[in-house]
Image (spheres, rainbow, N blue to C red):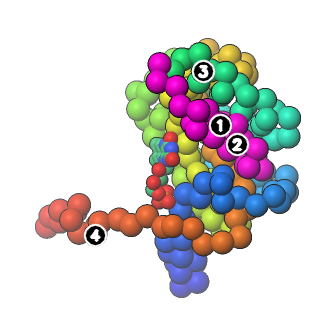
Amino acid sequence: MKREIETINQIIDKRQSTFPKDYIRKEIPKRIIEQILENANKAPTHKLTEPWRFKVLQGDSKIRFGEFLQRKYKATQTAFLQKKYDSLKQKTEQADCIILVCMQRDATEKIPEWEEIAAVACAIQNMYLTCTAYEIGCYWSSPKLMPYFGEFLPFNQGEKCLGVFYMGYCDKETLRTKRNAVHLKTEWYK
Ligand SMILES: Cc1cc2nc3c(=O)[nH]c(=O)nc-3n(C[C@H](O)[C@H](O)[C@H](O)COP(=O)(O)O)c2cc1C
């Protein structure tokens, strides 16, 4: 038990967002991607709706996704920035694997949408932690273009993308974010 608590504390402490510019060219084995998805699938889910859906992009599909983002950005932005435009494709080239993490609304809508969104967020946290344990860099991106993703891949009725999860190996330390102390956010009652 002591080892388990040390391990989970270390993994949570080590978890961070690592961006595609810091990824190296190294393939993530399929069995590892499958394990990341297995762990995502174990997230809590109210009334067992299991609302998370995953669209795994590798190889050509990943590159086509970058081109799609660029086209859509050009078509929708009023204040076009060349740097932003370029980065959309660069990120898809630098990442070894991209997972579009989606939420499938239960057809009977038996629980509020926010609970389904929260469940998907828990699944994404499991992905973050699993990547950390495998020493794979990753980050959750939520581009404004997400509502258009149904034009890139088929989406079911009631299915929405909530995140673009970029992954790639990273061989250096990158900047860590800090948190204000938890006691500032906590009230205790007896
Ligand atoms: C719901 C959600 C959406 C996010 N969307 C973006 C995003 O669009 N772009 C980005 O750079 N980071 C995004 N992030 C990652 C945060 O920027 C990151 O978690 C934060 O900077 C803290 O850094 P850390 O993950 O390394 O602790 C998102 C995180 C969450 C929880």
Q: Amino acid at mark 2?
A: Gln
Residue matched to label 4: 181
Residue matched to label 2: 90
Asked if disc 1 and disc 2 are in contact, CB closer than 8 Å, the reply is: yes
Residue matched to label 1: 86
Q: Is residue 93 inside the magenta stretch? A: yes
Cβ at disc 4 under 8 Å from ligand 1:
no
Query: What residue lies at 43% left-to-right and 35% top-to-bottom?
Result: 115
Left or right: residue 9 compared with residue 153: left
Residue matched to label 3: 74
> From the viewer's perspective, is residue 189 above or below residue 87?
below
Residue 67 place in picture, x, y as percent: 73, 28
For the residues labelled 1 and 2, the Cα–Cα distance comes to 6 Å
Query: What residue lies at 53% left-to-right and 31% top-to-bottom?
Result: 81
For the residues labelled 1 and 3, the Cα–Cα distance comes to 11 Å
Which stretch is magenta? Answer: 78-102
Crowding at mark 4 (Cα within 10 Å: few <14, some 14-19, many 20+)? few
Residue 112 place in picture, x, y as percent: 40, 27
Left or right: residue 126 compared with residue 113: right
Residue 96 place in picture, x, y as percent: 77, 50
Mark nearest the camera among 4 and 3 is: 3
**Residue 62 in sight here:** yes
Q: Amino acid at mark 1?
A: Asp
Q: Considering the numbered disc 2 on the image, is that residue within a helix, a strand or a loop?
A: helix
Query: What residue lies at 68% left-to-right and 44% top-to-bottom?
Result: 91
Left or right: residue 124 compared with residue 152: left
Q: Name which of mark 4 and mark 3 comes first in the sequence.
A: 3
